[in-house]
Amino acid sequence: MATARGPAYLLTLGRWRRGLGIALAALVPGVSQVDNKSDFLGRGPIAGTPVLVDAAQLLLLESSMPNMEKQVQALTNYLWSRHLPVEPEELQRRAVHLEKKFLWKNADSCQMEKLCGEVLHALRRTTYHWQELSYNEGLSLVYMAARLDGGFAAVSRIQARLPDFQPQTLMDFGSGTGSVTWAAHSTWGQSLQEYMCVDSSAAMLELAEKLLKGGSGSGMPYVPGVFFRQFLPVSPKVQFDVVVSAFSLSELPSKANHTDVVQTLWRKTGHFLILVENGTKAGHSLLMDARDLVLNGKEKSPLDPRPGFVFAPCPHELPCPQLTASKPLACSFSQAYHPIPFSWNKKPKEEKFSMVILARGSPEEANRWPRITQPVLKRPRHVHCHLCCPDGHMQHAVITARRHGRDLYRCARVSSWGDRLPVITPSELPPSPAQDPPES
Ligand SMILES: C[S@@+](CC[C@H](N)C(=O)[O-])C[C@H]1O[C@@H](n2cnc3c(N)ncnc32)[C@H](O)[C@@H]1O
Ligand SMILES: *[C@@H]1O[C@H](CO)[C@@H](O)[C@H](O)[C@H]1NC(C)=O
Ligand SMILES: *[C@@H]1O[C@H](CO)[C@@H](O)[C@H](O)[C@H]1NC(C)=O
Ligand SMILES: *[C@@H]1O[C@H](CO)[C@@H](O)[C@H](O)[C@H]1NC(C)=O
């Protein structure tokens, strides 16, 4: 921690810029307050819609599944420790590497058969085996108990960043228990008329429908205009104002499947494509690949030539500095939430997620303000902010009133992890990874 080194180590927003004779970052004129849209829901924990919470509790009570708490724990651990599937080329590369190693070891007695056996054995031992989860009735229920509330919290937080957006249609890929629909209804319920839930698991669709009906098989759904499909409609003719995929890309078996689905989802996007994954390196790098796919998209939608840009979180379209760092990190955010009060859920929890919002059209100036990527440390008379800057670099800024002016200092003090800091940074800064602060 830089704080441990004391004020002598104070970096400023302009530490290396000053050296280059470039002015210190200044607050955007006319912006006296921080981008506080994340405050839309208040900074406190998010709680699920009461109807949803009651429905989930009812469904669990009615189910006769044994050891629910243990199963929930097991699934949670499994999902968090999950990596991405190993691609065939990577397997091939590893096999060649191992073959060489064994060849060298067995140089004298080169018994081919034994060699192959050893390579295979070693590969099996050392390679991570990704397995597709099949969401049958039982696993769907466990998933609901384990993840419904956290997923709802993350998606609510992201959707709340677009409070002025008035979508009429939404598509949710890999809709699972339907947390995206519930969150969208609470944010954009006034304008939304159609929610298209796509999930390959019939059991999940059934569970989502039951939840919408308050936990029973009959009655009116709480949210009107929800449709369920087992297959992704591929025709580019019909677009949805907003397309969401939450925690579902990572469920696909290969990179080719990711590419396929992301391209289809983008073709179906009228305004915003919101992708959410776990706040792990695997989750974040999956999202960065999806971002690059859309941005480099030679693959133009035949019916929609409008280009895409990153709306959030990146203030640039360059490679992610967190992933290209010598010690790659996930770019993640966190949302506190009140879990559904099942017997094992007591305290408020934190949902750590990664996300990217892609949009059609051209970015506004505000989309290029630095993004705060870690908790803001408020200290006496100075504030530490870790920023992802529009020049594609990370910066650890220590902001003081004396160096940066009262406005910027105040602004930084009331900012939070995930907010943008409305500062003008010179756009033509040279890349200078050597000058990155040590811990970012
Ligand atoms: C981890 S769940 C996420 C559920 C939900 N989005 C949420 O946030 O709670 C992933 C869902 O993706 C679905 N899924 C997996 N592969 C799919 C595919 N090829 N097409 C549609 N849905 C798929 C699974 O059935 C599962 O319900
Ligand atoms: C955000 O800041 C503006 C300007 O200071 C203020 O008017 C508005 O109420 C704030 N919004 C929230 C949600 O705090
Ligand atoms: C993944 O891609 C393969 C090959 O293109 C395809 O056969 C398979 O159906 C896809 N699976 C999913 C779940 O999309
Ligand atoms: C993240 O968690 C989801 C469900 O919460 C799981 O399906 C997925 O495999 C995990 N993905 C990664 C990349 O860890």
Image: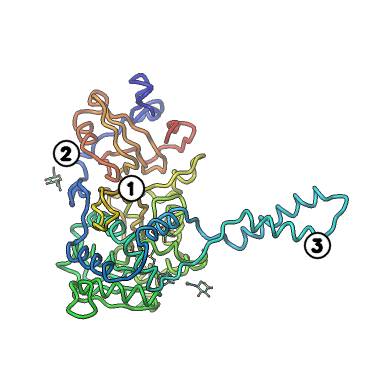
**CA distance separating discs 3 and 1:** 50 Å
* Badge 2 element: loop
- Dividing the picture into quadrants, the one containing residue 438 is top left
Residue 220 rendering spot, x and y as whole percentages: 17, 78
Q: Residues within 10 Å of mark 3 (few under 14, many from 20)?
A: few
2 vs 3, front mark: 3
Q: Quadrant of ligand 1?
A: bottom left
Left or right of 415? Residue 396 is: right
2 vs 1, front mark: 1
* Residue position for label 3: 113
Residue 167 rendering spot, x and y as whole percentages: 22, 67
- Give, as a three-letter code, the residue at label 2: Ser
Q: What's the residue at 66%, 60% (across, down)? A: 92
- Give, as a three-letter code, the residue at label 3: Glu
* Badge 1 element: strand
* Residue position for label 2: 32
* Residue 105 to residue 117: above or below: above
The quarter of the image holding the C terminus is top left
- Give, as a three-letter code, the residue at label 1: Phe
Q: What's the residue at 47%, 46% (across, down)? A: 323
Q: What's the residue at 33%, 70% (across, down)? A: 64
Residue 410 rendering spot, x and y as whole percentages: 19, 33
* Residue position for label 1: 333
* Residue 19 to residue 98: above or below: above
Closer to us: 189 or 175: 175
Residue 93 rendering spot, x and y as whole percentages: 66, 56
Query: Quick check: marks 3 and 1 in contact, CB under 8 Å?
Result: no
Q: Residues within 10 Å of mark 1 (few under 14, many from 20)?
A: many
* Residue 430 to residue 199: above or below: above
Closer to us: 397 or 18: 397
Label whose residue precedes the other's in the sequence (3 or 1): 3
Label whose residue precedes the other's in the sequence (2 or 3): 2
